[in-house]
Amino acid sequence: MTSDDFLQPRFVVNRVTAGDYDCPRKVLSFLTDLHASFRMLNLRNDFLRKKFDGMKYDLRRVEEVYYDVKIRGLASAESKQEAA
């Protein structure tokens, strides 16, 4: 598994389907930190800007998966305490 696989929302959906309900929380935390770091950069129209724009959509999709897991009560007690 590469880092690109980890960042794909499809990976999170597959992990949740397999019963790993903590995966969305972990990936969301990582993506949020990564997105915050990229926001500090002054990106123009280049390769990194395209990656950053793609990451925004991936982050949104992972947030939706995490929200679904949380609403359905499938998240572990640890993730519920961290979200509060």
Image (tube, helix red, strand yellow):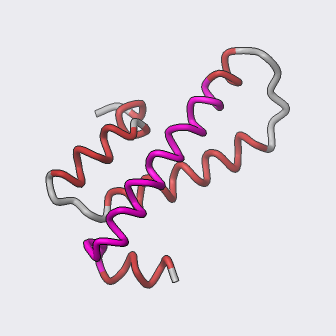
Query: Residue 62, relative to residue 73: is it above or below?
Result: above
Residue drawn at x 40%, y 36% is 8
The residue nearer to you, when weighing 64 against 39, is: 64
**What is the magenta range?**
51-76
Residue drawn at x 67%, y 16% is 47
Q: Residue 7: x and y, percent? A: 43, 38
Q: Quadrant of residue 25?
A: bottom left
Residue 74 colored magenta?
yes
Q: Residue 12: x and y, percent? A: 32, 47
Q: Main secondary structure of the magenta part?
A: helix
Residue drawn at x 44%, y 84% is 81
Give the side of residue 9 with respect to residue 44, left or right. left
Query: Residue 73, relative to residue 43: is it above or below?
Result: below
Q: Residue 58: x and y, percent? A: 50, 39
Query: Residue 42, relative to residue 14: is it above or below?
Result: above
Give the side of residue 26 with respect to residue 20, left or right. right
